[in-house]
Amino acid sequence: MIKFTHKNDFSVVKTGSQSKKILFSILGTKDNHNIQRMPLNISLAIDVSGSMNDIVHSKKDNEPPMNIFAPSMPANQMLQNIKAQQYFPQCAPQKNNSTKLHQVIQSAQACLDLLEPGDFISIVTFNNVSRVILPSTQINSTNKQMIQNLLNTIWAHGGTNLHDGWVTAGLEVAKNLNANYINRILLLTDGETNIGVQDTPTIVNTVKELFIRGISTTTFGFGDKYNEDLLEKMASISGGNSYYIQDNSEALSTFINEFKCLNSLVTDNATLEFVPTQSSYSITSLNELDFVNKKFIVGNLIHNKDMTYLFEFHFDNSLKNGDLFNLGKMILSYTDSKGHTQNQILDLTYFTVVDEVFTNQVVDKDVEVKNAILAMAKTQKMAKEEINRGNSDRAYELLNNSIISASAYSFDSNVNAEISQLTTLFAEKDSYSSAGFAKNLSSMAYTTRNNRK
């Protein structure tokens, strides 16, 4: 069951040019007679480049290219078109229990216990090129131990052809692509892409094309050297999740968090589409949702989790006092458990009032609070960019001002949680490298914008 509602900053509009913030809420719940999770069709794409042998320490110690893929092209054909088959020898250095790769292997093995009979899983490794360690295989009562043993055969050496690994994993998911399943690639890397396709817009465009065909991507970034802009974009453009693993104690809990998410999904391909009635208007997603085929990508709908998205509209109203003004419709689309596309529609209609009445309107508190939280996320992104440019003092100034501004809404527990998290990170800034501090800010902003907290 999906409940789709909205709240307005003001319940009315005025005559003339104006802006309006509207908060949309999506709450997905499973029926009592259908509480079982959707089956999974996943592929683990594991980075086995040389840098994955690095020890993971404690935290304290442009426009995308033109679309060259026909929309009707099947996922496997689209991926085959960009897949280059190359194979290079690799050596097998001794594993270290504290390396990134070892933590990935241990975490993946633990999460295998969360798979159920009927789920599909494949395992792909990539360094200079990709290799299929386990072709897409349906889980049964006897083969989990075999899969765990296969994970123990993985070692790290060479460069990082991230795009090739992701494509190969996509091909495995595409073998059993089913609208009734959660079809997802789990990309595990330290993000140092240095071989093959390295251009971020090109990679992101391919991820978008696969999402259109029904396959999402979740990314895990290890350490302080991966490209967070790339990994977060790959996740957001496809309705997946993105995680930052900075500490040697975080890998397992982060993997389990993703599997808990997968086990709780009502659907993972939800979108929002605005259909205007006005010829002159603009719409901005303050959550910074990605926009694909005229639809905003929502992605995961998690059981009993209220997902909220704030939009700002600019428009002209030529009507007079007392007239009914229709801004348009917001359409929520998703695939139900039977693989059928469902739509829910909200009609955005308001009475026109004179300026004096409009001026006396009181802003809805939930809209105000969400706007404050998203403003903090935006500032965190700006501060991250300043740090990456070497302007730490400017970044700290932005963060401090953000905390002060948000304090006006400290009556709300969600705002207080945001302030507390940022204050703690800010207080511990000297214990992080510049890259680590920047990645923390980026991850915080991402999780806030995408309702992942």
Image (cartoon, grey):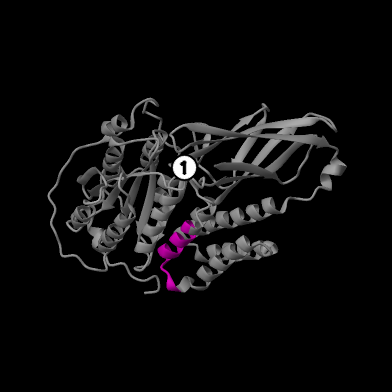
Number of marks: 1
Q: Is residue 389 left or right of residue 3?
A: left
- Look at the image and give the residue range highlighted in magenta: 431-443
Q: Is residue 438 left or right of residue 90?
A: right
Numbered disc 1: secondary structure: strand
Tag 1: amino acid: Thr
Closer to us: 194 or 288 = 288
Residue at image location 54% in from the left, 42% down from the top: 1
Farthest residue, direction front: 33
Q: Magenta residues: mostly which secondary structure?
A: helix
Quarter of the view holding residue 321:
top right
Does residue 438 show up magenta in the picture?
yes
Residue at image location 29% in from the left, 29% down from the top: 77
Q: Position of residue 344 (x, y in %)?
A: 58, 35
Q: Position of residue 435 (x, y in %)?
A: 41, 62
Q: What is the crowding at mark 1: few (fewer than 14 residues within 10 Å), some, or many (at least 20)?
A: many
Q: Position of residue 196 (x, y in %)?
A: 26, 43
Q: Position of residue 251 (x, y in %)?
A: 35, 62
Q: Is residue 334 left or right of residue 203?
A: right
Does residue 222 show up magenta in the picture?
no
Which residue is labeled 1 in the image?
A: 267
Q: Is residue 69 left or right of residue 96?
A: right
- Evaluate whether residue 336 shows in this view: yes
- Evaluate whether residue 389 shows in this view: no
Closer to us: 391 or 152 = 152
Closer to us: 68 or 265 = 265
